[in-house]
Structure formats: structure tokens, C-alpha cells
Image: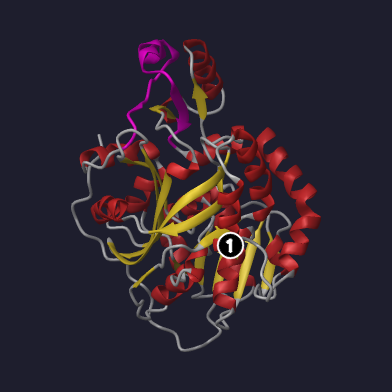
Amino acid sequence: MATIPQTPRTIEVKAPVQSQRVGALVVGGDHPGLAIARSLGRRGIPVYIIDDQYCISSFSKYASKVVRVESILDERKTVAAALEVGRRYNLRDWVLIPTRDENVAAFSRYREELARFFRVTTGDWSSVEWAWDKKKTYELAEKLDIPCPKTFNPRSIDEVPALFPRLPLAIKPAVKENFFYATGAKAWRADTPEELMSLYAKAVAQIKPEEILIQEIVPGDGTTQYSYCAFVQNGVPASVLTARRVRQHPREFGRAATYVETIDAPEIEALSERFLRAIQYHGVVEIEYKRHAKTGEYKLLDVNARPWGFHAIGSAAGVDFPYMIYADQMGMAVEPVRAKAGVGWLRMVSDIPTALSDLLHGSLSFTTYIQSLRATRVESVFSAGDPLPSLAELVMLPYLAAKKYLKFKK
């Protein structure tokens, strides 16, 4: 059973440093890392990036240096790589920012070791584990009276038939990255008893039974999926943005958003703040919800304890999340801000096939598609002031697709 943290924790940051040379070390050079480099680089803050493959950030004028390392998937290797790069380039007291879930776990678990050298933006494991392990997330949400999909955790295939009357169901992982890198999927849908048994057996071949969750499906596509995004200080949100994931791929269990638009969604703010207070969270966070088409109830799906894929929408909507992370770690005041509604973020390279599919499927009208383009204020990679990463991405698409395929085949 989940035990709600009882003792408030205060995240301490190191004393402010006057030198303008104190920068940020970002782990991951895909578009989320590129957005961090641009946010900080425009303010004259140096940004180093590490990645284990060639990345588009290498072509950004805002990335001071991009260093290729052996791995940013393995926890211990990632920690060792960050410290080695930090020492090699004299980055002591720089701000360490992860962009992937597995990096969050590594930096949280090894926080004490990393904090001797860096300003670590990832919180203590006693707080972060509630986001990392979805089984714990749902247990805590239930204790806090936050709606979430009914979730089951059978320990063997013999317990699965008891769930047949609840079909259709989704099979998903408690620890997202273990499953995602093994299968390339965020979740699987089972409509029949045969499918449920087959998919459960397939999941057991990839991850431990205790990590396999079977969950009720909240009907709807990305248009019913919402995000609460915030910079939080010791459980109290300082700046907030809420958004709707208008298009995603795949349509039902989206691995990633392709078009997102900011909205006003006060219903999910209260639920999110209850969760964040309970775990005394500190840093940036995205909490995902899905609105039930029949009941109108918002159900918590996921908590991301890091800059999320579309976080660049923040600066366009008046909430510059990467700079808030940096300012907080430097001991500077973080001014409370609320994002304005109606601002769109687009991931063009994946939105074109997604939109075409939705148009053919009948879930998207051409008029709505054009309206989304008109609302777009930021594209995930393209920037008129920093155009090379978008050109590089087009050239590198075969390489990036091959790397992703090989990663999922391992």
C-alpha cells in the first residue's frame, strides 16, 4: 500500500554564483533538450549537451558543446558520463537537467553523489518514486481521492481470466521505460479474452509480472487528453500551464504528442496540486489526464518528473520552464506566471502523417487542421533564428529511425 509522505521536505539549492559562466548540462539532445538549449542560450547561459547518439542539438547555435557518451539509458553509466564530462570541461556547480525518465531515476537515486559536483534539478527519490513507478502513482492517487483508471496487477497468468468481464482493457507497465524500450509501445489494447491472455504472456516475456498493470480504458483519443504542466517549489506550484493533446500517435495510446494547444483547465489544477503537495515535489512536472467522454471525469494517467516533450510551448505562452529551473537552482526569484490559452505547439515531422491518418479516419476535419496550424506559435525543432537543427533533422531522419528501431529490437 502507498504511504503518503508525512514530513515536508525543503529542497536546498546552492548559494547564488555571480559568474555568468555557470551554465547547464542537459542530458539528451533531441527536441526537448534543444528547447532547453534555446531557452537558456538566448539569455547568454552556456549549455552543454550529452547524448549517446548523433543529435539535432549538435547543429544549434545555442548549444555550446555536444558530447557523445557511451550510454544515457543505463543508470550507472549515465551518472558516470555526466560526472566525467563535468570534470573534463570544468562544469562544477553547473545545473544538471535530464530530459528522459530513465535519467530522472538515475539522477534521483544517485542525487547525493551528483550534488557534490552539480546543481541537481531532480528531487529526492522519496518524492520522485511516486512519479516513476505508476503502480505507486495510482495507489497514492486513490488515497488522495484523485480519479484514475481502475488498475489491476496480476502476479501470474492464472489471475488474468478473472478480468475478462472488464474487457476491453489496456496492458501497460508500472515502469514505463522498461516496457517502452522493449516493445516500442506505451500500452497494448485487449478486446477479447484471447487477446488479453496473449498480450499478458507477451508482456511477461519482456518485463517482470509485478511491473505489468492491466487497466480499464478511458475512451477517447488525444482530444480528450489533458496536461497539467508546472514549475513547483516544495509542493507549491509557482507557475502553471494547462494544455490539451489535440493530436498524438498512436491515436489511442499516444507515445508522443504531435499537436498541443494551451487551454484553461481549472479542474485538473486542483487534482494535480493535491498530488504534488502530498509528495512535496520540487521542479518541473507534467501530469497527464484523460477526460471520460460519458462522465466528464478527469482521470490521472501519468506523472512526468522532467521537462516533457512539448515543454517549448511554455515560452510561447509566457511560461519559460527551462529558465525557471535554472533560476531556482541559482537561488534567484522565480516569478509566478500563468500561461495564456490558445497557443499551439507542433511536431511537424510526426504531425503530417498523424493528421493525414486522422483525416482519413474521420476524427479530424480539414477546417480544424487549418485552425491548428494558425494557432501554432512554436514548432518542436524549426526556429527562424536557429534553422540548422530542422535541416539536420530532415537529413538525419533515416539514421534516427534506424536507431529507434534497433533500440526497440534489443
Left or right: residue 398 compared with residue 405: right
Task: Indicate how the structure is coloured in the image.
Answer: secondary structure
Nearest the eye: 191 or 343: 343
Query: Which residue reaches farthest bottom?
Result: 18
Q: What element carries label 1?
A: helix
Look at mark 1 in the image and give the residue it sits on.
Answer: 374
Magenta-highlighted residues: 148-174
Identity of the residue drawn at 47% across and 44% down: 223
Identity of the residue drawn at 55% across and 38% down: 363
For the C terminus, which image quadrant?
top right
Residue 353 position (above or below residue 381): above
Left or right: residue 166 compared with residue 102: left
Q: Is residue 171 within the magenta segment?
A: yes
Residue 171 position (above or below residue 309): above
The kind of residue on which mark 1 rests is Arg
Q: Can residue 27 be seen in this view?
A: no
Identity of the residue drawn at 32% across and 52% down: 127
In terms of image quadrants, where is residue 179?
Answer: top right
Residue 406 image offset from top left, x and y in percent = 72, 38
Query: Which residue reaches farthest front?
Result: 367
Q: Is residue 165 within the magenta segment?
A: yes
Query: Which residue reaches farthest left?
Result: 6
Residue 236 image offset from top left, x and y in percent = 27, 64
Residue 172 image offset from top left, x and y in percent = 47, 31
Residue 376 image offset from top left, x and y in percent = 57, 62
Nearest the eye: 375 or 288: 375
